[in-house]
Image (cartoon, grey):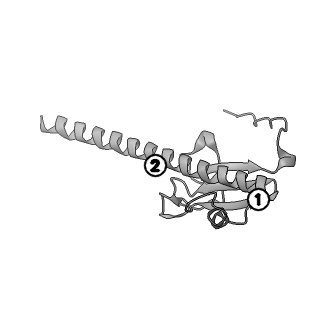
Amino acid sequence: DRANHGAIYRLLLVAGYKIHEAEVRNQLTIRTAAAALACERYRLKHVRWPDSLDALVREKFLDTVPLDPMDNQPLRLRRTKDGLVVYSIGLDRADNEGNINRERQLELGVDIGFQLWDVRQRRQPPVEAPEVIR
């Protein structure tokens, strides 16, 4: 019976960890979405992207810069060649410079957040995904 209790305890521990991980991902999604929406509102008002998330606070688009629950630092904002990325360092706790992959958020090397495109990059036909070789 003791062996069964240990196995059950391990299963509950793993399940609890997975629930916690899912809740952290939900918080990351909500926080980065709020910051991304504030960035778009800033762009609409100023006809350019903000230089930092602090600019969104100064302009009152956000009350404060949301914290990244992975390291309790402010969320990151990075300008790209075709837009902007608002992101968290993700579950690997490494800053991968805004490498967003919604289908593979749990993989190493992936950050969690949102990509915003410059106006001239919007409404483009979708890029074909590369064929997977198995």
Q: Residue at x 23, y 41 (%)?
A: 9
Instruction: Give the residue drawn at x 59%, y 42%.
Output: 104
Question: Left of 14 or right of it: where is 49?
Answer: right
The residue at which mark 1 appears reads as 49
Amino acid at pointer 1: Trp
Q: Answer above or below: position of 15 versus 79.
A: above
- Tag in front: 2 or 1: 1
Where does the image place residue 72, in percent across and percent down from the top left? 47, 63
Q: Is residue 48 visible?
A: no
Mark positioned earlier in the residue sequence (2 or 1): 2
Residue at image mark 2:
24
**Residue that lies at the very extreme toward the right in this rendered image:** 120
Q: Is residue 60 visible?
A: yes
Residue placed at 23% from the left, 36% from the top? 8
The residue nearer to you, when weighing 117 against 103, is 117
- Residue 61, image quadrant: bottom right
Measure how far apart labels 2 and 1 are at the Cα level. Answer: 27 Å
Total labels: the figure holds 2
Vertical side of 87 occupied by 58: above or below: below
Residue 132 picture location, percent across and down: 70, 34
Q: Tell me which corner region of the image, top left, top right, bottom left or bottom right, holds residue 5.
A: top left
Q: Are marks 2 and 1 in contact (CB under 8 Å)?
A: no
In the visual, does 39 lie left or right of 26? right
Neighbourhood count class around disc 2 (C-alpha, 10 Å): few under 14, some 14–19, many 20 upward: some
Location of the C terminus by quadrant is top right
Mark 1 neighbour class, 10 Å CA radius: few under 14, some 14 to 19, many 20 or more: some
Residue at image point 84% right, 35% down: 125
Label 1: state its secondary structure. Answer: loop
What's the amino acid at mark 2?
Answer: Val
Q: Nearer the viewer, residue 113 or 94?
A: 113
User: Could you tell me which quadrant the N terminus lies in?
Assistant: top left
